[in-house]
Amino acid sequence: MASFCGFDKQTLERFADLMVGFGANVQKGQIVAVGAEIGKEEVARALAASAYRHGARFVDVGYFDPHVKHARLANADPETLEFVPSWYGDRILALGDQRCARIGLSGPTAPSLFDDIDPGLVGKDQLPAVKESGTVVNDATTNWTIGPCPSEEWAALVFPDLDPSAALERLAEQLVHVCRLDEDDPVAAWRERAAVLIDAAAWITGQRFDALHFEAPGTDLTVGLLPTSKFLAAQFETVDGIKHMPNIPSEEIFSVPDPLRTEGVVRATKPLVLGGSIIEGLEVEFREGHAIRIDADKNAEILRGYCERDEGASRLGEVALVDGDGRIGKLGTTFFDTLLDENAASHIALGSAYGMCLDGDDDRERINLSRIHVDFMIGSQEMIVSGVDSAGSRSEVLREGGWSR
């Protein structure tokens, strides 16, 4: 019998164990922080139970209520919307200082909640995201993961033509598939897929391209790379040697671009959910690394607001490639959730870069720094990705979802 979240009891337990034991790789005696929205209590409790089974010393579950955020956006002084109490960031830094594990749950619980709010105001309040999260990721002081949590509200957004129960059942089925929970041994399945991605990342890194060029309908974009940029995939390691998989599912290889060398126009191939609102028909133009134009069919003001937060917010901090062998893209489903949609298509991210994507420290002072990190999807079957060498010659890297090697 399905639970409120759409997973039956056994599947829910298997999902929790995959997230805790493999994704975050919780260690005996660790403190575990679970982050969820109101509406995800059932899955959060399953994660807590699994964490204790894995030997956690304490599990701290924190819930964010988007309806309270709506009340703030609707009623507070607009000049105060960028304010975040210091203890929000202090908590994240303390989790790093105490070498804790972190687990987050993605998936919207109130998809249309902010439709009646001025998009410009929504762009000012970025909670529950805080800039200190980027610090602990780059410092590699926590072992962490994020996974999808099904809900009736999310299912209705993804499958609007189905009745609520059928939509939730379909969403849960697809999440089971993309998380490889339909395998007898999901961990072994993920290790096999991770090995493929890690090999692809090593191959791209070994080419030592000066830039990547993206070409597709509406897109003609060149993203410069740093001399020590390297591609990573699927597996992180903390400063204490704890290996973990930060996203379940994860189908990407990613690196750090040169924030001063992005040129051209790029068109998003999937909607972007940002600040609880949906941005559709996004198109961004770059010049000398800076996003000089942000247009969209809907809610462009939200992303414009994010990009005004600081100097680095309008520059790239990540470039990621996704092949056609992953399970998400093959479904043809738009999930309206960045965790899933970014692992279905190649993407770029505005804002803060991941320092672990450098081979050494020579270029560390050159990477982009920002209070934001916003991924948006640009890949498609029509896209051709080419590597560009220092002389300007191109060689194909990815075409029709296949690696060109």
Image: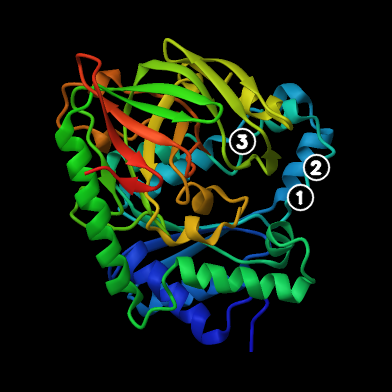
Q: Residues within 10 Å of mark 1 (few under 14, many from 20)?
A: few
How far apart marks 3 and 2 lie (CA) works out to: 14 Å
Nearest-to-viewer mark from 3 and 2: 3
Residue at the limit of the structure toward the bottom, as seen here: 1
Amino acid under label 3? Gln
Instruction: Report helix, strand or loop for mark 1.
Output: helix
For the image, the number of numbered tags is 3
Quarter of the image that includes the N terminus: bottom right
Which amino acid is tagged 2? Ala
Of the numbered discs 3 and 2, the one sitting upstream in the chain is 2
Q: Which residue is mark 2?
A: 71
Q: Which residue is mark 3?
A: 126
Taking depth in this image into account, of 116 and 309 the one nearest to the observer is 116
Q: Is residue 291 left or right of residue 20?
A: right
Given contact means CB atoms under 8 Å apart, are the residues at marks 2 and 1 in contact? yes
Query: Mark 1 highlights which residue?
Result: 67
| Contact? badges 3 and 2 (CB < 8 Å) | no
Calculate the distance from the C-alpha at mark 2 to the C-alpha at mark 1.
Answer: 6 Å
**Residue most extreme to the top:** 288
Q: Is residue 263 left or right of residue 301?
A: left
Q: Three-letter amino acid code at disc 1?
A: His
